[in-house]
Amino acid sequence: MTQPLGPMNRPPTPASGSATPELRVARFRRHGRLLVWPAAVLIAVAGVTGFFYDNLPWPWAKDWMLVAVAALVVLLLVVLPFLSWWTHTYTITTRRVIERRGILVMHRRELNHARGYHVAVRRRILQRPWGSGTLTLSDGVEQPLRLVDVPSAELVHEVLVDQVEMSQMLAHRDGGALPGQATRPSPLLP
């Protein structure tokens, strides 16, 4: 889906003073290569269980013990890492960056674009071949928001810088109001 572009290849800005809707720009998770080890464990457990089922060397061992141990290993080393990866999402909208994480208890953290922040990209040696990296968003007031192991880190960096720039331009144009808020006259002026 593409947006119509205005001058200088930017989306058209809404009229001055009008409410700007909050649109989702991107939603993503950590890089999927984190799931390689859980997938390898799942394949290994399935192979070992299939080989030893009805073929256990001990006369006292039962097949249900083998299946129970295999289920426990799959739960701890496959299902829980997958759920941890699946429930940790980053969302970039036209107004803010939202981090959501947690399996049983949901944690949510937001950072508004209009406040402005510094974006630092760190790419380790194992992240470079896949184009991923860790982005740190620091506004100088709160604890920095870290987007860990983001796929296409350079593209996400560009999107964040563009959103901060656009949000600050809209706030400046509307007299300092945050995007989406109507401007109010100062109570000191008649």
Image (spheres, rainbow, N blue to C red):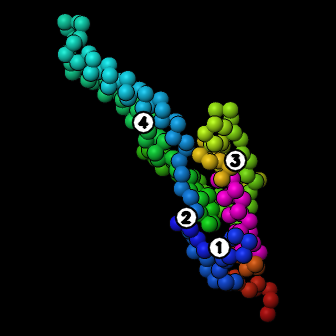
In the rendered image, residue 176, in percent from the top left (x then y), is placed at 75, 75
In the rendered image, residue 136, in percent from the top left (x then y), is placed at 69, 47
Please give the name of the residue rendered at 62% of the width and 66% of the height, measured from the top-left corner: 94
Residue 117 in sight in this render: yes
- Secondary element under disc 4, as helix, strand or loop, is helix
Alpha carbon of mark 3 to alpha carbon of mark 1: how far?
29 Å
In the rendered image, residue 152, in percent from the top left (x then y), is placed at 62, 48
Disc 4 residue type (three-letter): Leu
Q: Nearer the viewer, mark 4 or mark 2?
A: 2
Disc 1 residue type (three-letter): Leu
Please give left or right for residue 4 compared with residue 121 in the image: left
Disc 2 residue type (three-letter): Arg
Please give the name of the residue rendered at 62% of the width and 42% of the height, measured from the top-left corner: 132
Q: Are marks 4 and 1 in contact (CB under 8 Å)?
A: no
Q: Give the mark nearer the N terminus: 4 vs 1.
A: 1
Is residue 161 inside the magenta stretch?
A: yes
Alpha carbon of mark 4 to alpha carbon of mark 2: how far?
28 Å
Q: Give the mark nearer the N terminus: 3 vs 4.
A: 4
- Magenta segment range? 156-172
